[in-house]
Amino acid sequence: MTLLRRLLLVVLVFGLLLIGGLMRFVDTVARQAEPPPGQRTDGIVVLTGGSGRLTTAIRLLDAGHAERLLISGVSTGASKATLAQSLTQALPEHLLARPEQPGIDVPALMECCVDLGFEATDTAGNAAEAVAWATGRELHSLRLVTANYHMPRALVEFRRQAGSITILPHPVRPDFLRVEDWWRHRADGFFLLGEYSKYVAALIRMRIEDQIDGWLKADS
């Protein structure tokens, strides 16, 4: 019975820590806001994989929030032309440049000011790809555009690899996820639990790698 009680206590403590951590994570996601209007960076990097990210990034580029944009994690079959076509279809009609109205000229922006990154297959790869891009172009600050639920994990990876490059988070709120009342919707709850688990895994991996680096430096 004593062993059983101890086991139940461990399970209870673990469950409370999990719930507490998840609630703090969700609160962080819900409280995220866009940077103040007019705040500019040297470059913009947008991570593929969710609705609204690319349209947000191209609108920021068109509005002059940076001079150049990296789309990181592009599939090998994509090109500037296919992405321009998709963005043109996704943007509201009244925002697009037409002969009779000013607006966003997506193909022109793609040609002049957008770079595509094909190497990244995960968030750590996105960070490595973006930092290499920024370093090669001597950019000292990046506006990071990704979904609000993905931003905490993305910031862990980006800030670890960024060095002296400043990272400005610009979260995008996806239409499919209801963060404010997630506990009312089972699908949203399980989705956020999965994202929280990935976030914790990224933190643990980062600390393990830092510890190993510390041991290697001490031995050298």
Image: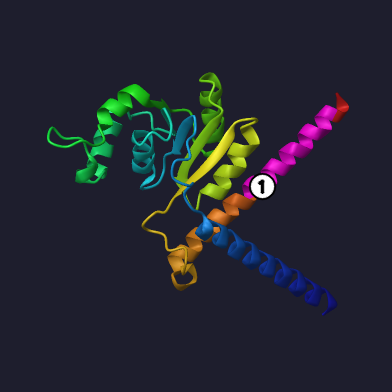
Q: Position of residue 198 (x, y in %)?
A: 58, 50
Q: Position of residue 167 (x, y in %)?
A: 56, 38
Q: Position of residue 51 (x, y in %)?
A: 36, 48
* Quadrant (top left, top right, bottom left, bottom right) of the C terminus: top right
Q: Quadrant of residue 15?
A: bottom right
Instruction: Give the residue at x 44% y 64%.
Output: 187
| Residue 209 magenta | yes
Q: Residue furthest right?
A: 219
Please state if 9 lies on the left or on the right of 114 as rendered: right
Secondary structure under the numbered disc 1 in the rendered image: helix
| Residue 23 magenta | no
Instruction: Give the residue at x 44% y 41%.
Output: 38
The amino acid type found where label 1 is placed reads Leu
**Over which residues does the magenta segment extend?**
201-217
Instruction: Give the residue at x 19% y 44%.
Output: 93
In this rendered view, identify the residue nearer to me: 121 or 85.
85
Give the vertical position of 51 relative to 184 (above or below): above
Q: Mark 1 — residue? A: 203
* Quadrant (top left, top right, bottom left, bottom right) of the N terminus: bottom right
Q: Quadrant of residue 107?
A: top left
